[in-house]
Amino acid sequence: MGNKFKLFLLSGALSILSTVNVFGEEIDIQILATSDLHGKFYPYDYAINEESKSGSVAQIATAVKKYRNENTIVVDAGDTIQDNYAELFFKDKIHPMVLGMNEIGYDVWAIGNHEFNFGVDNLRNIMKQFKAKPLIGNLYNQDGSKFADSYTIMEKNGVKIGIIGMCTPNITKWDSVNLKDYIVTDPVEETKKIVKELRGKVDILMVVTHMGEENEYGVPNSGVNDLAKACPEVDLIVAAHEHKLVEKAYVNDVLIVENKNSAVSMAKVNIILEKDGDKYKIVDRKAESIKIADYEPDKEVSKKLEPYHQRALKEANIIIGELKGGNLAPKNEIEGIPQAQIQPTALIDFINEVQTYYTGADVSAAALFNVDANLEPGKIKKSDTALIYKYGNTLYKLEMTGKQLKQFMEWSASYYNTYKPGDLTISFNENIRGFNYDMFSGVDYQIDISKEPGNRIKNLKWSKTGKEVKDTDKFVVAVNNYRVNTHLLSYGEIYKEGEELPKVLEIDVKGNLGGVRELVGDYIKNVKGGKIQPSNPTNWEIIGNNWDKAKHEEVVKLVKEGKIVIPKSKDGRTPNVKSITENDLKK
């Protein structure tokens, strides 16, 4: 038998084996997904005027370069052009967020709710700048035509990937004026139609959507869990909106991932397919979260973003007002015991004043995020608002009853250790962080720390009328998104299973201006005309600490002399975790 004939037979055999998939040919399709970038194009937080390498588009560029291969698709699930001074650049030829994402090579951009904050015309302009495909399948023009494409089909080495884009239907709540000429539909029903249309045409079906896991406001189909239950044909959902990390979750066998906000994380999903005749079948799905803080900014991308960075820096240093008449927070009587957490202060009162103004709430709650937070008399720069309000929380409006408010306040008051005879200072629970202690305006109250947690709020009255707050009263409360999503809308620390929870009336109040920190700046500049001065709030007090005043003064003196040190928690994060006692004076 000749060699050529042997080769012919071998070639034919290999062809047959390949056709029946004896060799199990596999392809790994990789999806790199981000969301809720919120203007973080450069590793800098302009609101607090300091470097921030927790995440940025410039750092994502480095991470994508590391993981990219010929079978990689890069997607984003929206909320891109709002926050971190992103609104500065809407009139530019290209927005820095878009520039950075174009440099990275994003394939798909699903439109988020904050994209509508600045008007539809602005959004259309941003969409034109993207090299990525903008997607939103549940938004229509008035004539019934699609606002943008609902889906796109990509192909990688013969594998066809259908990518559907959706957005939360609750955009009508937050941007009703901007969307008055448009029709917003149910994203789950729209997805079901597209799934039916794409059946048999793609090997992988995924949804990139600006929706969290659970439904909002009780609106059916506004969360991806409902989407997964209705569309089991979907292989992957890239969720967003809630700013929480979901490395991987399965609902109805649909893989769900979600990222932390401000470019803190990137989801890496690998979908393994095996050749099945002339098509492919999925044999495995893997997901992991990539921490963007582990990556340095890409030098080339950073260089192109540098001019935008310099403009934002200049903006951060603009003078927006002036504080006259004294500090917003008093000096600590005892070093190591934050005075602003044991008495009413102009600092917390000002935050609550801002929150009340923008929500029209009856009650406002705010925490001291930094024990050294203060603002001293003099000119106020735009970035100085972070000295008043450190974090990028957004503002929520809730409806509560008097009973729910008291439960909330009792939970908050558990921050204090119970006063015992012989104690000479007020101290804090070692297991509770300071940012979980809220102080309230709109009501007058006392905190009796001689009582055990759960029975401390006394004489709770309405500040305006002096009348008792009744359990059945209903009213609006202003509070930040962290407190709402972490404590007030779930059972556990504040409310017990089966109890009625507060109702959400509005999220991200005045989101076009930013979060609470940005509202503080807007209030100083545009509401107060650039002039503010400290108030003298007296609506709450701590009672029950019946110590010997002379011995308390001795503690003040000894701490000042360095002979007594106020103890901290073992990790150093919680100050003042144990009271100084009369016995300590005898040592």
Image (tube, rainbow, N blue to C red):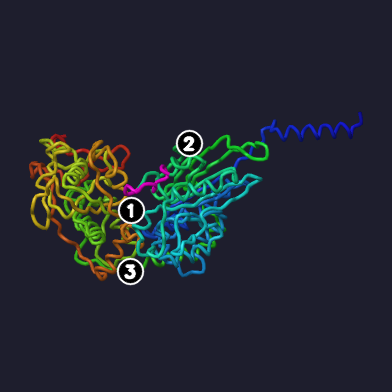
How packed is label 1: few (under 14 Cα within 10 Å), some, or many (20 or more)? some
- Whether residue 281 appears in this view of the structure is yes
Image location (x, y in percent) of residue 492: 27, 37
Gap between marks 1 and 2 measured at Cα: 33 Å
Left or right: residue 535 versus residue 132 is left
Region of the chain picked out in magenta, as a range: 216-226
Location of residue 203 by image quarter? top right
- The one of 100 and 236 positioned closer to us in this rendering: 236
- The one of 330 and 175 positioned closer to us in this rendering: 175
Amino acid on which disc 3 is placed: Ile
Gap between marks 2 and 3 measured at Cα: 54 Å
Image location (x, y in percent) of residue 469: 12, 49
- Whether residue 53 appears in this view of the structure is no
Image location (x, y in percent) of residue 277: 67, 37
Q: Secondary structure at mark 2?
A: loop
**Which label sits in the foreground, 3 or 1?**
1
How packed is label 3: few (under 14 Cα within 10 Å), some, or many (20 or more)? some
User: Which residue: 11% across, 51% down?
Assistant: 461
Predominant secondary structure in magenta?
loop
Q: Are marks 3 and 1 in contact (CB under 8 Å)?
A: no
Q: Which residue is mark 2?
A: 253
Image location (x, y in percent) of residue 115: 43, 60
Q: Which residue is mark 1?
A: 393
Location of residue 273 by image quarter? top right
Amino acid on which disc 1 is placed: Asn
